[in-house]
Amino acid sequence: MKRLLTLLCAALCGGLLLASAQPADGHRISRPGSFTFGPATTIAADAALEPLARYLAGYLGCAIRNDVTGDGVVALTLDAASDDASPEAYRLEITPEHIRIGGCTYGGAFNGVQALLRLLPPAVYARQGLASGTEVACGVIEDAPRFAYRGMMLDVARTWVGPAGVMRYIDLLACHNINKLHLHLSDDEGWRIEIRSHPELAEVGGFRGGDSPVKAVYGKWSEKYGGYFTQEEMRGLIRYAAERNIEIIPEIDLPGHSRNIASLHPEIRCNYPPDTVSTNGYDYRSAWCVAREENYRLLEDILGEICELFPSEYIHVGGDEVDMSQWKRCPDCQALMRQRGMNDPHQLEDLFMERMAAILARHGKRPAVWNEAVRTGGFTRESRVHGWESVKACLDATAKGYQTIVMPGEYFYFDMRQTPREDGHDWAAVFDARKVYGFDFARAGFSAEQLRHVVGLSGAFWSEAYVSHEPEKPDYLDYMTFPRICALARIAWSGNDEGWDAYYRELKEQHYPRMAAMGIRFRLFPPKVAYAAPKAAGGSGVLTVTSEEGTEVFYLVDGSDREHRYTGPVRTDQPWKYRFYTRYGTARSPYAADDSRWRTIRPALVIETSMGESERFPYTNASTYRGLARTRRACRQQDWILYTFEKPVTCREMFLQTGNRQLPKTIITTGYAEVSYDGARFERAAELEKGSATLRPERPVKAVRIVSTCDDNGTPYVTIQPPQVLPRL
Ligand code: ACM
Ligand code: ZN
């Protein structure tokens, strides 16, 4: 963080404190006295800051006037730029007579407004106006961000989030001093932005399932669903974001992740017959052919309109996870490689991306790309790299001299689950806000030279698992991203020198009330559950819960949906039946329970299916509880998966799952589970829900079978998870 002032003193004054705020405010001087908000308090701004005055009035409920001088005013001013100051630096001065917020840019003044809001009671974030008589202590804060890029990526392609949802999210990000919103607008499963020269891209590609040529892969087959932004709506969002100091950076993901557009324009694909047998006729190819010259004309049309629409200097053109096996099988791509003397398909990606860069350059823009696009180091240094695969990928990009946004999945992918039993992915890591806060450039291995190439940090929320979490409600998005975004915003603004304990205290005491006032359904840390067994507890066992202060504890008992309030230790001899959680306003924690609840057994079993066995993911992966197995082909009506136990199994619950955990993809879309007590006669016991079924057999089970009632599952195979068997206790 930039040193702007020497810290002179930090005294309490008049019982009010210039409270520590998010992000940590840089340099502050406390002065005696306070400013009191009343009916006569007004907001006034220099002409260029009028939208900011309206924004602030929306929180404070004050009237706006023209004159920035005089008493009783909250004045927003554009100050002269100084050579060494960050464009986003601000100065906030509070005297008994007035409040002055200045910055040399709109963004600087916006940051000063955020600093003022953080000094006010948390209720201000509910936007119901400030109570007359509210006081704020006098003093001066001068501060500037550590990084120019403090970003968040939202995937609106896999799960559609419409204008109102994005607007709400922009408001939440803005209050955390996040200043970039990277919108992932296209992927295999959705195209979310109107392209006027090719209206079918959004009008058709924005909807999948039902009668759409874009097949569903995430669970809803019969229903056609989705949406897209018109250019007019996007212009509104860009303006709305800019007024909140957020730049929207669009992404069209190229040349891979393009199955959606290829479903509408099959001609963009490579020139070889598709493999449609194993996928029930679904052409699974997802990359643009590099050798097909007409492709670049279509891309010129698309990117030309994107450049026209978005004011951002950088346009993200993807570059990640290209399935290059398509280029290897394409005679035209192979001929191009020979003609250019290439021996590595990554050079083909370089060639494709250089052509994207050339299109962007003609429109006065630069490319942003995922880190794979700079693997060879051949791609233009004009580009900005988003390092996602690992810390090493970020180190590599910065070592090669690329301007880099650091967002390795194991710290910044907020679609990862936060503890092992919560929802979300786990392929990058399982982590909560504490790990995000702990990201340390020096420990991660960045040299001073590499650090000079770091433009900033970004979080990401990929939305393939969101589809199963009622995206029309923000619960899952909020839960997954807050308070991890708080931690990200803090380290992007000022670092983490104060240490986790101090930051966690601040999180609880200051951020929780603010987030609750904003209506964020954020995640609380789980309570701790201890069980004293009957012997130790003198007769009956006792469950005791400790939780974050200020939260209320509740619990559920298996067999009922009734919510109980926890008021003291609970007596029981069956601790595994209890799940505890906490609430704080709109927030809630994950479930916590005695360890006995989660205990599983691994009875010996054999798995067979009617769909053949994948060579790479054999049945034994799942039957030995080591990992997942796959079938050789997609499922059709009456296909089955049979689990036969070596000895009949006694259990209180058995969970059978197809598909990846939390991802309603590669599942048996519709079907049922049967149970057999003798291995010969089967009875229907449960319907599949998102590819899974829970059985609670009364007797020892010899075999269970999942039977498909769907014609297609939209992917080339079915994933089989090991069964989760809970013992009788
Ligand atoms: C990515 O996660 N494929 C950028
Ligand atoms: Zn090709």
Image (cartoon, grey):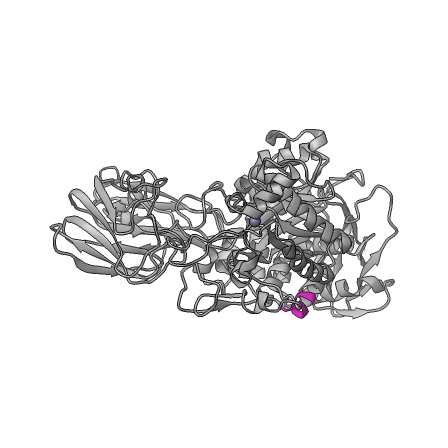
Residue 506 visible in the current orientation: no
From the viewer's side, name the closer residue of 517 and 675: 675
Residue 644 visible in the current orientation: yes
Residue 435 among those drawn in magenta: no
* Residue 482 placement, left or right of 179: left
Across and down, in percent, residue 46 comes to: 84, 62
From the viewer's side, name the closer residue of 575 and 609: 609
Across and down, in percent, residue 717 comes to: 37, 51
From the viewer's side, name the closer residue of 92 and 254: 254
Quadrant that contains the N terminus = top right
* Residue 92 placement, left or right of 636: right
Q: Is residue 534 above or below residue 685?
A: above
Across and down, in percent, residue 15 comes to: 68, 50
Across and down, in percent, residue 463 comes to: 51, 55
Please state the extent of the stretch shown in magenta in the rendering. Answer: 230-235
Question: For the point 71% across and 49% down, which residue is it?
Answer: 357
**SS assignment for the magenta stretch, majority:** helix
Total numbered labels placed on residues in the image: 0
Question: For the point 21% across and 44% down, which residue is it?
Answer: 729
